[in-house]
Amino acid sequence: MADPPDPRLLVAIALVCATLAVIAAVLAWRQHVRHREEIGVLRRRKERLKQALWATGERYWDYDLATQRVTLLETERGDGSLRLHERDIDLEQVLLPGYLDTARERMAAYLSGQVRSFEYDMRVHAADGRLRWVRVRGRTVESDAARRPRRVAGTLVDITRARSQERDRRIATEVLRSMSEAVSVVDADFNFVTVNPAFARMTGYAAEDVLGRNARVLDSEQHEPAFYEHIRKRLVRSGRWSGEMWQRRSDGDEFLCAIEASAVESDDSEDSTLYVTVLNDITQQKRTEQELRYLANFDTLTNLPNRSLLSERLSRAIVRARREGTRIAVLFLDLDRFKDINDSLGHAAGDRILRAAATRLQQTVGEQHTVARLSGDEFTVILEGIEGAQEAERTAREIIMAFEAPLLLDARQEIAISPSIGISLYPDHGQVPTELLKRADTAMYQAKSAGRRTFMRYDDAMDASTRQRARLSAGLRKVLDRGELRLVFQPRLSLARSRISGVEALLRWYSDEHGEVAPDDFIPLAEESGLILEIGEWVLREACLTLRRWQQHGAGDLTLSVNVSMLQLLRGNFPDVVQRVLEDTGLEPSVLELELTESVLMANAAQSAATLQAFRALGVSLAIDDFGTGYSSLAYLKRLPINTIKIDKAFIDGLPADPEDVAITSTVISMGHSLGLRVVAEGVETEAQLGFLAQQRCDEVQGFWLSPPLDAHSALGFIRNWDGARQAPRAHASGLP
């Protein structure tokens, strides 16, 4: 039997076991504590990671090269707590086409050592389906024994907003560069910080010339320095200012600017303020506005006030007259036969006539009164503070007298022209501008009807006359179609041969609506409307046909006189019209005499001379009608191819008792004969007149002493039966077949 174990040995073994147990327990406790500490550290690290990711807005990603697995770690909020959420990413699902390949290329370049870090901005599909921009950064976090990367990890941040802001900044910069407005930014001391290209173009200062310099470099001398200081103080105080001011370019030229300035806070420092200023050069705009205002109120041809400004001034004048108890006169002027002159000489010459007329009118009236051009050849004068109609009439006479002298167009050409003037008075004839102008216009037409080159003051009876005139003008347009025109013929007696030498064709109008219309009433209307061209050709043709028929019935050796208006004469084709009528009717040119008044000839003496020479070349005779009533020059008379002068009835009426008429008539006859002209006396009505004219060796007479105007049948009978007696015999009834 074995010996029992030594008790000491057992104790020793027990002690060793107990020690080992204690040591194991201690080690286990230490390991537990260490594990708990590691868990705490990891928990703290995880919490810090959560907080960091949440604070920065970034996400953490991990890329396992062996498994090609990409893990995304991001924060989530739920139930009031912050937690990490881990999920795998399918790059082909997340990245937009094109970005995945580029990302792989960038990663390969990093792993191969070509670049020191991995960084790439890319567009991705967010979890909510929207497209976002993200910035991905990463580095190697685990390698194998050969130091080859096994894992790459890093951060991912959403930069959509930053990209958008950067894009906006680029757009703003480009917009600033492309703006036509000059833009500058100055600091709190008004030193230039930046300027755009338009600023350089506008001011002449390149950016490098002004950066750091004070904005006072642009101050002009148009404003006092205090003005600019005041503006800048207001800008500092309120943060905004807009207005207009003169600025100065680099070359010293000054220009007017429209300026918008506003303050913005700078990002450089807490207390720094910048001022953005937008400048527009409005110099040309202001000049254009001034020109438009001028065009709105003034006539560009004559520089006189136009209708708009006239109405404004007349309104103000009425207010003053009403307040002060004074009167106003409105003079409405129209240049006689201007249209004919304008049509014949051209619009350029017409414009020179209007400018010359405006100057003479203003000189006559004086700067203290308003002279305006309404339109065409119509002018208006406003006379303020007058006592009565006598002052207005005196001014009208002065104007007419001022136009007695021809207007000088250039060094070689003069034009004789006269005005017809109508007068209205405030408050007698109207209370508002339109009434006064209308009634002055009505009076002006009455002046034209009275023979032109005169004035008329408005009265109520003129309105009825104006309405009648309008009705006549409307009816006149249909006279040829209706066959309402007819010719009468007044015989002309040769005193030397005591025989009928010719006839003057005179136009008459009998209207079914208006009855017999006097020539003085309808001929001016025909001239104003231009119908005189058509009517005049009809008169010429009908008169030539009549004389041709008379010749065929034995009434030969007669001359035919036909009156010609200014419009006919000044139209360049009238000689062609005369030639065509002569050819069509078979009448010899030598028997045709065209009668023109002094005013017609002298309205444009140069052109008249050329046209008269064309008539003379045709073989047609020419006569000046109403001689002595116009303003002809003897020098012109000498040069013009005139055959006959006719003494106006106004000088015959007083013969032989009136010494002035005797002197004038005797002088005209003597002068005519000295120039080799035939002299005809018009309007002879008495034996005494005839005796005096015969004594003065006047060549021919016509008038009621001899015969009134007769129709074609009666005129032919009168001519056939003339026997030289004092009294005309009765016309033969069988004059024409």
Image: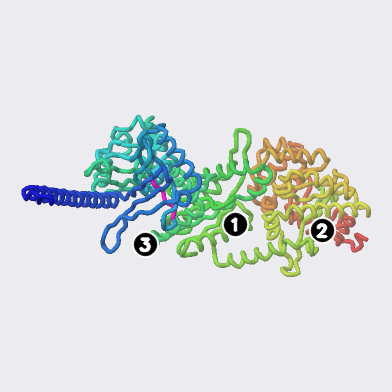
Of the two numbered discs 1 and 2 on the same chain, state the one appearing first in sequence: 1
Residue 133 among magenta residues: yes
Left or right placement of residue 523 versus residue 117 in this view:
right
The amino acid beneath tag 1 is Ala
Mark 1 vs mark 2: in front? 1
| Residue position marked by numbered label 3 in the rendering | 323
Per the rendering, the mark at residue 447 is 1
Of the two numbered discs 2 and 3 on the same chain, state the one appearing first in sequence: 3
| Residue position marked by numbered label 2 in the rendering | 727
Find residue 615 and report its horizontal and vertical position in percent.
79, 41
> From this viewpoint, is residue 729 visible?
no
The part of the chain drawn in magenta is: 130-134
Q: Nearer the viewer, residue 127 or 178?
A: 127
Residue positioned 68% across, 40% down in the render = 605
Q: Residue furthest left?
A: 8
Q: Residue furthest front?
A: 1
